[in-house]
Image (spheres, grey):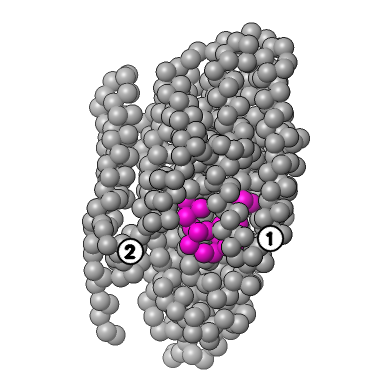
Amino acid sequence: MEPIPAPSIDLVSLAPVLVLTVFGIMVLVTDLFIGKNKSALVFISLTGLLMAAISSLAKYDLPVYSFNGAYIVDHLSVFFTFIFCISSALAILVSIDFNQREGIKVGEYYSLILFCTVGMVLLASSTDMIMIFLGIEIVSICLYVLAGIRRNDPKSNEAALKYFLLGAFATGFLLYGMALIYGTTGSTKLTIIAEMIREGSVRSEPLMLMGVVLLIIGFGFKVASVPFHMWAPDVYQGAPTPVTAFMAVGPKAATLAAFFRVFAETMPEISPSWGILLYILSVLSMFIGNLGAIMQTNIKRLLAFSSVAHVGYLLIAIIAKNSLGSASLMFYMLAYAFMIFGAFGIVILIGRKGDENLEIENYSGLAYKHPILALSMTIFLLSLGGLPPLAGFVAKFYIFSAALKEGFVVLVILAVLNSAISFYYYLKVVVYMYMKEPIKEFNITLSPMTLFVVAIALFGTLHLGIFPGPIIALAQY
Amino acid sequence: MDISFDAIPLAHYLLLSATLFVIGVMGVLMRRNAIVVFMSIEIMLNAVNISLISFDRYLNQHDGQIFSFMVMCVAAAEVSVGLAIIIALFRNKPTVNLDEFNIMKS
């Protein structure tokens, strides 16, 4: 047997992953040696995220392949690394006061967020199915623990169990799909798979097509698209609110980046076969997400269904499979990060210890007591719905124009129709805030860190909506 | 005893793997005991491992074997987290019947 050649090792391209891992371990170790005041941990985590974001710029002349073609630093991965670092930083900031209120042990919490970010960076930068699998699992396992981190709360436990069982189930499908694709193409590397598909010999292999279907099921579960969304509302409701916000943004963005890489970049030649499946998934996600959200009375469940609908919009970017599609995916996820953290920041402020005040009727009359909070919430919700001139509108506009460029007119019409439906339930919350009498005394502690996150999110939502130019130029670079 | 791998065609291994996978999926969908569901998921992962190894041998490569090692590692990590979650749950509510976990409703 000939020796296995050692791959070229290029640690610089792996810099964000290494930095985050080191800082994650540092948080765990520091936690043991400091006393009651844990604010040092926040500082270490945020420094780690900042350094990871900076170190992702270490490579120029993109794209750079390393580790024998298993890892890539390209425009998509760098932009997504920034989105991950921003969303993880916002998640940490928004957790500080929440953790104090709910009595969550913070050492492992912050390090799990950092480790989860490691997985997300790997996921967005992998060009090998083994690495994509590992990335997805690092992200998922961290999220299972984070969802259940309130160990004594039955809701949190239930969320963790449901998430875990369905997540592991999905992993099975994903893996089987990868195995079949590996079997037909003889490689786990996306570049070689792409080459084989371009040559054409494997295009109509039944095993290949089965592999593609299984991959779609696996990814569909992980991003919570209909009909694989049933875990999302329960998990979103049961998980601690900052974790809910975190998993609605970062992990979803990472999985969609990998989704884009595997389908739009690797197999554009067989797009009729996977395109139609994604088309169905996208339309179903939009309709069931939006119609499901109308019936919700709990704000976290409402946002969960709305995120299912947003996955429907995001899948359009993958179906479009052009460069505008990837750029609009990046812009959308950045805008979505701000909108979601803003909305959940307000949910955290209104919420009380032990998951109280999470019903929509608890928001009645908020505008009389805290007009600024109510106004911010209105802006985030309208931006999620896609009202100009907010970030959500520009993001949707770019995704739809990517799809129109490829001639998906019906899909875009359905998506626009769905945006209109979504205003019904977003405005319902606004109506409660502005036009109803308070049902009980608001007892809001305006915790500075959460307010800070809301302010950042507000700035992001408005800035990306009014001056989207520079960021879009970056995304299309 | 000299039974070569080539004596059995690839299709048989794939069939075995597919059968095990379907058994796993059925187990997840039909059983209500969290531990049994969990076990069925492990059957699914191991079915995939059989596929990977047989493809690997058939293609005369190393990638599939390495992949299956990764799958085992991840499965082990998942088991530890999964059992921890089930134990945490059991402390609050002494049952492993999935139908009884329905606090959250639309």
Q: Nearer the viewer, residue A257 or A120?
A: A257
Which residue of the protein is positioned furthest toward the top in this rendering? A441
Q: Is residue A278 left or right of residue A55?
A: right
Is residue A354 visible in this depiction of the protein?
no
Is A159 located above or below residue A365 in the figure? below
The crowding category of the residue bearing disc 1, from other C-alpha atoms within 10 Å (few below 14, some 14 to 19, many at least 20), is some
Residue A158, position as x, y percentages in the image: 61, 37
Residue A215, position as x, y percentages in the image: 57, 64
- Bounds of the magenta span? A311-330
Q: Nearer the viewer, residue A13 or B94?
A: A13
Label 2 secondary element: loop
Q: Residue A180 lies in what quarter of the image?
A: bottom right
Residue A297, position as x, y percentages in the image: 72, 29
Is residue A400 visible in this depiction of the protein?
yes
User: Please, which chain is the residue tagged with disc 1 on?
Assistant: A
Q: Amino acid at mark 2?
A: Pro
Q: Is residue A72 left or right of residue A255?
A: left
Would you name the residue on which mark 1 appears? Answer: A409
Q: Give the residue displayed 44% in from the left and 79% down from the top.
A: A195
Q: Give the residue displayed 61% in from the left and 75% down from the top.
A: A209
The crowding category of the residue bearing disc 2, from other C-alpha atoms within 10 Å (few below 14, some 14 to 19, many at least 20), is few
Q: Give the residue displayed 34% in from the left and 69% down from the top.
A: A69
| Circle on res. A338 | none
User: Please, which chain is the residue tagged with disc 2 on?
Assistant: A
Residue A342 is one of the magenta-drawn residues: no
- Mark 1 vs mark 2: in front: 1
Asked if the residue under mark 2 is in contact with the one under mark 1, i.e. CB atoms within 8 Å, the reply is: no
Would you name the residue on which mark 2 appears? Answer: A63
Upstream in sequence: badge 1 or badge 2? 2
Label 1 secondary element: helix
Q: Amino acid at mark 1?
A: Val
Quadrant of the drawing holding the N terminus of chain A:
bottom left
